Image: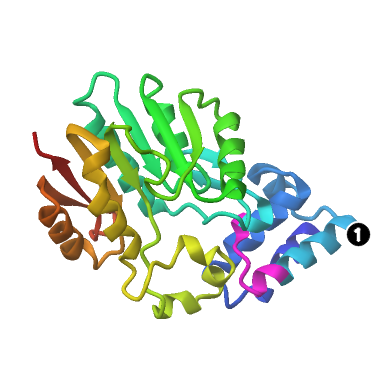
Amino acid sequence: MKIRELLDWSSKSLVRSSSPDIDAWVLLKFVLQADDSWLISNEHAPVGSQDEARIRELIELRKRGVPVAYLTNSRQFWSKDLYVDSRVLVPRPETETLVETVLRIARSFRSPDILELGTGSGAIAVALSSKMPHAKMTATDLSQEVLAVAKINLQRHDCTNVNLEKADWFSGLEGRRFDLICSNPPYVGRNDPHLEVPELQHEPQSALVAGKDGLDAIRQIVSAASGYLHSKGWLILEHAYDQAGDIRAMMNNAGFVDVHSEKDLSGHDRVSLGRKSE
C-alpha cells in the first residue's frame, strides 16, 4: 500500500477512537521514523511490507484501547518528550497546571527544597527541573519499576538536581523538611464510570484509584504533610474537577492557611494548595 492509502485505512479502522486521524498519523510517523513534512510530500510512496505489517499490528492494539503513548513509548509534556510505558500513567495536559502553580509559589524561595510524591513517569520533576535548575528536588514512588521509568526521563533531560527515592508517601522520609510538597496522586473513586474508558483500563489502576470516593491518598498526604514542611512551606495537590471543596476543607482542618484552588485551562478547579502556618 501507499502512504496515503495506509493512512486512510488506519483512520477508518480507528473510527471509534476520539481522534482517528491523529492516531493514524502519529503511528505511521512512528513506524516510518518520518516527520510531518516528509509524510505530506511522500504520500504516494509505497510502504514496505514489514512496515505495513507493523502499522497494522499497532492499529489493532489501538482499536483495543491501548494508549498511543504506550505504542510509541512517547508523550509530550511541558514541551518535553518523555518515555512512557504501561508501568506509568500517561501524563495529562491538565497536570501542567500543577507545574505552573509550583513554579509560581517557588519564586518566594531563594533555593527551594521540593518534594514530589508519586512521581510516576517523572513528568512533573522533569518540567520543574527544567525551569528551576537551582532547586533541590526529591521525587518518590512506591514502585521500583516506576522509578526506573522516571530515571530514564530524568537522564534524558539532564535533570541532575532531582534525586529519586523509593517511598510510600511519607514513609521513609521521617525527620526531613521541605519548602514545597507537591503531588498528582491517584484521585479516582473505585466505581467511577470513567474507569470504563478503554484507555484507562490499560493504565496502572494503583495510580488512578484511591478508595471509594477517590480521596484516600489525598487524605493521607494532607494529614501528614505539615510534619514534613518547613514553617511557611506549601502543600500543592492536583485533583479531580469536583474535589476542590473537599480538599480545601481537609487542608483547613489540618491547620493550613491561605488555602485556595487554581483552575486548569478548561476552567475547572484542578490544583489546591495551602501554606503551613508559622
Question: In this view of the protein, which residue sits in the foreground, 237 or 169?
Answer: 169
Q: Residue at x 89, y 55 (%)?
A: 48
* Rendered location of residue 28, percent (x, y): 72, 55
Q: Which amino acid does label 1 sit on?
A: Ser
Which quadrant holds the C terminus?
A: top left
Asked if residue 65 lies in the magenta stretch, the reply is yes
The part of the image, by quadrant, that contains residue 59 is: bottom right
Give the number of marks.
Answer: 1
In the current view of this chain or complex, which residue is farthest to the right? 49
Which residues, given as a range, are shown in magenta? 61-69
Q: Is residue 135 above or below residue 78?
A: above
| Residue topped by disc 1 | 49
The part of the image, by quadrant, that contains residue 204 is: bottom right
Q: Which residue is drawn at 31% across and 73% down?
A: 213
* Rendered location of residue 71, percent (x, y): 68, 57
Question: In this view of the protein, which residue sits in the foreground, 219 or 194?
Answer: 219
* Residue 11 appears in the picture as rendered: no
* Rendered location of residue 184, percent (x, y): 37, 52
Which quadrant holds the N terminus?
A: bottom right
